Structures are given as structure tokens and as C-alpha cells.
């Protein structure tokens, strides 16, 4: 068994050294405890500040939503504007054998629009007329084309536009709305006149 060194009363310097070591250790420990206490207090202070900022943000969001809900103007229908293929100013029309393009917009202008995740749908009552995307902007669901064959002898056809308007500012769906638009079919113009300039003679026998 290892013997512990005995400190003799005469070893004053050794006693003083041991006492100083104890005091230094105690001072270091106190400093570390004080440092850690400050860190914990700072963390708690930041958490309180973050909670206050989060509460302020939530309050502002509630105020914005309240404003949107009170000023929300629901879409009540669709407007159809022809962008090409027509020859009658102010009217929807297509010449037989040609294609017309159209763009849909919300009524009233600037209203709430369609419900989240919905797009307009289009149908036609003339089976000879072919509806499709607008070739100039095929990804835009508010635009479409209608191709009328030259053989179509009808006077007009109807395009039905169906939408699901948003019921409120959150975009939840309201009741479906349909609008019907009549498109006149104009007959294809006759071929251009070619005047006779002479005669041709063919021998038959």
C-alpha cells in the first residue's frame, strides 16, 4: 500500500502552494459556472424573443387573411375573346376550312379566379368542329383553338366553357359555372376569278 507523504509543520512553502492550488481551482470553477449560467440565460432570452416575433408574424397573417376575406370578389363567369381566325368585328366567327383561336378571362375582371387545382373545360355541340390547345401557347389552359372543316355547312356552333370559381380567398371550390358562346361559321370564299386569255385545241381522233 502506497504511503501518503506527510506534510511537516516546517514545510510552510508546501502548505501555501497547496492552499493556492485549491483557491485557483475554486476560482476556475466559479468562472465556468458563471459562464454557463450566462449562456443559458442568453438561450432563454433568444427563445423569448423568437416567440414574440412568431406571435407578431401570426398576428399580421391573421390581419391579412381578414382583409382578403372581406374584400374577396368571387368570379361569376367567363368572357371569351377571339384572337385569330375571325372576319366579323366584335363577333365570334370562323371561316369554313380555317381555325380560330380564343382566350378565356374571368368575370368580373380582377375577381377571385378559379378554385385551387382546377382549370377550365371546353366542349362544342358540332361534332365536325375540333377543339384543341392554342398552338402559340399550348400550356395556357385559358386559351384554345377551334378548327372548322371546309365541308361544314352549319350556320354556327356553340362552345360551352365550364369553370369552378374559388369560393373564398383560400381557393376552396365553389359551385361550377357554365357559359355558352355562339360562333358563326362563314362560308369559304369562292376561288379567285381567272379571266380567259385564249383557246386551247386538242385533237380527239
Image: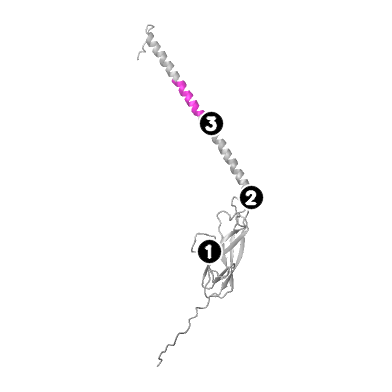
The CA distance from mark 3 to mark 2 is 39 Å
Residue picked out by circle 1: 144
Residue 56 versus residue 194: which sits nearer the camera? Answer: 194
Q: Is residue 31 above or below residue 72?
A: above
As displayed, is residue 33 above or below residue 80?
above
CB within 8 Å, label 3 to label 2: no
In the image, residue 3 lies in the stretch drawn in magenta: no
Cβ–Cβ under 8 Å for marks 1 and 2:
no
Task: Give the mark nearest the N terminus, 3 or 1.
Answer: 3
Does 77 appear above or below 9?
Answer: below
CA gap between label 1 and label 2 equals 31 Å
At horizontal 37% and vertical 10% (from top left) the residue drawn is: 13
Residue 45 marker: 3
Q: How many marks?
A: 3
Residue 148, horizontal then vertical, whole percent: 53, 71
Disc 1 crowd, CA 10 A, few/some/many (<14, 14-19, 20+): many
Q: Is the magenta stretch mostly helix, strand or loop?
A: helix
Instruction: Name the residue rendered at 42%, 16% in the picture.
Output: 22
x%, y% of residue 12?
Answer: 38, 8
> In whole angstroms, how far apart are the C-alphas of marks 3 and 1?
59 Å
Asked whether 44 or 188 is in front, the reply is 188
Question: Are the two marked residues, 3 and 1, in contact with CB atoms closer than 8 angstroms?
Answer: no
Q: Which residue is drawn at 39% across and 13% down?
A: 17
Residue receiving disc 2: 71
Q: Residue at 61% x, 48% y: name it.
A: 68
- Stretch in magenta: 28-41
| Residue farthest left in this picture | 2
Amino acid at each position: 500500500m502506497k504511503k501518503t507523504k506527510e506534510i511537516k509543520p516546517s514545510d510552510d512553502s508546501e502548505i501555501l502552494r497547496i492552499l493556492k492550488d485549491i483557491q485557483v481551482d475554486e476560482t476556475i470553477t466559479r468562472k465556468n459556472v458563471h459562464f454557463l449560467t450566462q449562456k443559458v440565460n442568453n438561450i432563454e432570452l433568444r427563445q423569448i424573443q423568437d416567440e414574440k416575433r412568431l406571435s407578431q408574424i401570426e398576428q399580421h397573417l391573421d390581419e391579412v387573411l381578414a382583409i382578403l376575406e372581406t374584400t374577396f370578389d368571387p368570379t361569376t363567369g367567363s368572357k371569351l375573346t377571339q384572337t385569330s381566325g375571325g372576319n366579323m368585328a366584335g363577333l365570334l366567327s370562323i371561316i369554313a376550312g380555317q381555325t380560330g383561336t380564343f382566350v378565356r378571362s374571368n368575370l368580373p375582371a380582377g375577381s377571385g379566379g378559379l378554385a385551387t387545382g382546377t382549370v377550365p373545360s371546353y366542349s362544342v355541340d358540332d361534332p365536325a368542329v375540333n377543339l384543341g390547345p392554342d398552338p402559340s401557347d399550348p400550356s395556357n389552359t385559358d386559351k384554345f383553338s377551334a378548327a372548322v372543316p371546309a365541308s361544314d355547312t352549319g350556320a354556327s356552333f356553340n362552345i360551352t366553357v365550364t369553370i369552378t370559381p374559388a369560393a373564398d380567398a383560400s381557393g376552396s371550390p365553389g359551385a361550377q359555372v357554365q357559359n355558352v358562346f355562339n360562333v358563326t361559321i362563314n362560308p369559304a370564299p369562292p376561288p379567285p376569278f381567272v379571266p380567259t386569255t385564249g383557246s386551247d385545241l386538242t385533237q380527239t381522233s
